[in-house]
Amino acid sequence: MLKKKIAMLGAFAVGKTSLVQQYVNSIFSEKYQTTIGVKIDQKVVNLNETEITLMLWDLYGDDDFMKMKPAYLIGSSGYLLVADGTRAETIDVALTLHEMASEVTKNAPFIFLINKSDLKETWEIEPETINHLKSKGWHVMITSAKDNNLVEEAFTLLTQMILAKQ
Amino acid sequence: MAQHTINNMIREFSEPVIKYILHEIPPYVGLVVLQADQDAKIKNWYGPLDKYFDSLPVENNDIEEYAPFLVGMLPPLVNPMVISHIQVKANTYAEIHILADEYNQNWIFIIDQTRQVEIIHPIIQLFNEEKLGGITDKKQSSSQGTLSALYLLDYMSFEKMSDGYKLLGNTPTWFEEINGKLHFSAKNIDLTETFPFLEVFHYEAEEIWNAPHDGKFVSGLWEENKKNDEKIYLQALALRHIKRNYLLIKPLNDQSDINDGFIQKARDQKLTLDQLASTEKKLKQLLSFKDQFVSIISHDLRSPIGAVIGLANLLLSDTLLLSKMNITQLELLSDIKNEMLRLLDYNDKLFQWSNLELGNFRITRKSILPEHIASYVEKMQAAKLRDKNITFIKEIDPDFTLNADETLLGNALNNLVGNAVKFTPSGGTIALTFIKNRSGSYILVKDNGMGMDDETRNYLFSGFTRKTTVGTFGEKGTGLGLGIVKKIIDAHDFSIKVESETGQGSTFIIKIID
Ligand SMILES: Nc1nc2c(ncn2[C@@H]2O[C@H](COP(=O)(O)OP(=O)(O)O)[C@@H](O)[C@H]2O)c(=O)[nH]1
Ligand SMILES: [Mg+2]
């Protein structure tokens, strides 16, 4: 059976774990429990009559407290860069991680997710920033792990991109 | 100086110490920190000390006495100094970091390594057996035998073969708890099917496994779910020993170590700080919006108010009209004019205030003549001074020099003198003094009026105030004037204070800093 590794990358507390949990187990928790190390979840999907097992690598966030090891990205067929729409600085963290990831994965497909779209009042990211990301030809999606908004779509699109690249 | 919990640590340490902890100390251990001064006297301690010590330390006692394993270690020969696998107590091993900070304080970090030593110990044992010259066959089996028994200590042990892994001994109980299954391909085990994490670990472990000498490499943590929905953290250890390769997997069973880890706390705290910072930013934006709003409105109100005053003036100068009015009507008309003048003044001050708040003013300092500014103030207040028959005294030290924004400082002094006029009874005296003495240059605005109580003095410069004091002629204030004065003085980096007592008059003192 086809197996694909997908890495979740982004600053801490942007919602990587929540996105995976929403996608795999359809659950969301308000409580923040920082990920230490790596948690790998699996999800079997059917796309274009192919059965694929997605290996979702939920990695700890990259910050002053812990640095991401490039080795964790080896073998990834694609990755989701996650930022938090209510914390503008998480965009920069995602961009830095993208540099590392595109090198290690030899330009594997990725999608830029700006998560927590349900938090309108504290939203910090300007439309110009999003347009700027899109202008690089990147896929940008505004998601909410809490409201289950565009979560499945994001994983499906990434899987399609991975299959198309084969 | 009680024992501090890890929770409080981060708040209390200096930045370099926090940085050291965050970058150099693994996040999942119950960290103990001892602080000693340059004479190696104990100053402070943090974390679960009972892990390593039988009693609590006593402040100012010798640290070497409390922690014998530190004898001769302070101050560190190299900074920081790290020593691994120190036996701190029977059956307890630790890694010790000694860091001297820029204040010559010695920081000792103690990290539990008992589990690691437990793994390494049988290997060292084997190593020594080999050196003692055992029989080759026996050696092999004894090496595997020891590793095989490790499952009793919760380890899963494998020998790495060219095409997979061979399980040594049995599987430990936790493997059952996480629903683990071993996948065989041909006669060996494909471990990455069970632990996909090992895929990346292999890249790092291969270095050890292909090395010409013995060695070990420890992986990062990964998380697995237990059947009961709890989680478990696992860690792998790659070993090369006498040309054979092994892989051990151990659980970090001390959950409390992980949950108490300050990574979680540090991140929680960082999140809160980030939220505070962004709230502050938004508040500032709102405030600036408010000031802009006030600025625009007060600017636009100026002309209609001016028009009403003009109209009132027109009516008041119409003798024919005035002759037809009775006394009450006349009083009403002049009240309208006075109220409108007051409104205009209030409005002007609001305008100034909001622009000061917005930072819409630039200080242009130049050398100005005190005489000049004093005369300006006198001229501005001339009518009111005359009305209340107040004597205005200007005293100017010939040595007095002043570098300031003439318009803004003139405005501030005008506000202060205007205020003094308000609170000084008829026939009183107001002095505007520019003095220079050994302790500096000062501008004083002194009156012999009503003075003020402590409470009034305290809120005086706070910007807006609801409480405005009525002057000696019943003059009403705007509550804005002194706020503006304070802004202007601050913008110059000068300082202002007031000395006053009820009934004794007030003196405002501006200290000039050149
Ligand atoms: N409102 C809202 N909160 C979210 C969303 N996704 C995650 N969170 C919260 O953000 C915090 C961090 O989420 P987590 O998934 O642990 O982030 P990670 O560190 O990137 O794995 C948790 O308190 C979540 O409940 C979302 O879409 N909307
Ligand atoms: Mg996480």
Image (tube, coloured by chain):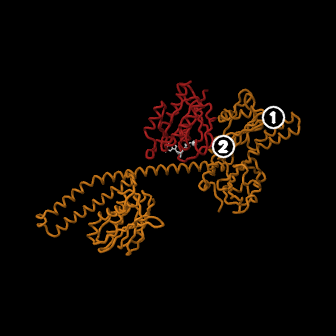
Q: With respect to residue B337, does B137 lie above or below?
A: above
| Percent coordinates x, y for residue B190 in the rendering | 70, 31
Which of the chains is red?
A: A
- The image quadrant where one finds the N terminus of chain B is bottom right
Q: Chain B is drawn in which colour?
A: orange
Residue on which the image places disc 2: B233
Q: Is residue B403 above or below residue B423?
A: above
Rounded to the nearest whole Å, what is the CA distance between mark 1 and mark 2?
30 Å
Question: What kind of residue is marked 1?
Answer: Ile
For residue A64, above or below residue B168: below
Q: What's the amino acid at mark 2?
A: Tyr
Ligand 2 under 8 Å from disc 2 Cβ: no
Quarter assignment of residue A21: top right
Residue B127 position in % (x across, y down): 83, 39
Residue B409 placement, left or right of B173 = left
The foreground one among B445 and B372 is B372
Q: Is residue B273 visible?
A: yes
Mark 2 nearby-residue class (10 Å; few <14, some 14–19, many ≥20):
many
Q: Nearer the viewer, residue B509 or B269?
A: B509
Residue under mark 2: which chain is it in? B
Left or right side of B439 for B248:
right
Between residues A56 and B421, which one lies in front from this camera angle? B421
Which is more N-terminal, label 2 or label 1?
Answer: 2
Circle 1 Cα neighbour tier, 10 Å, few/some/many (<14 / 14–19 / ≥20) = some
Q: Name the residue under label 1.
A: B242
Q: Residue at x 27, y 62 (%)?
A: B342
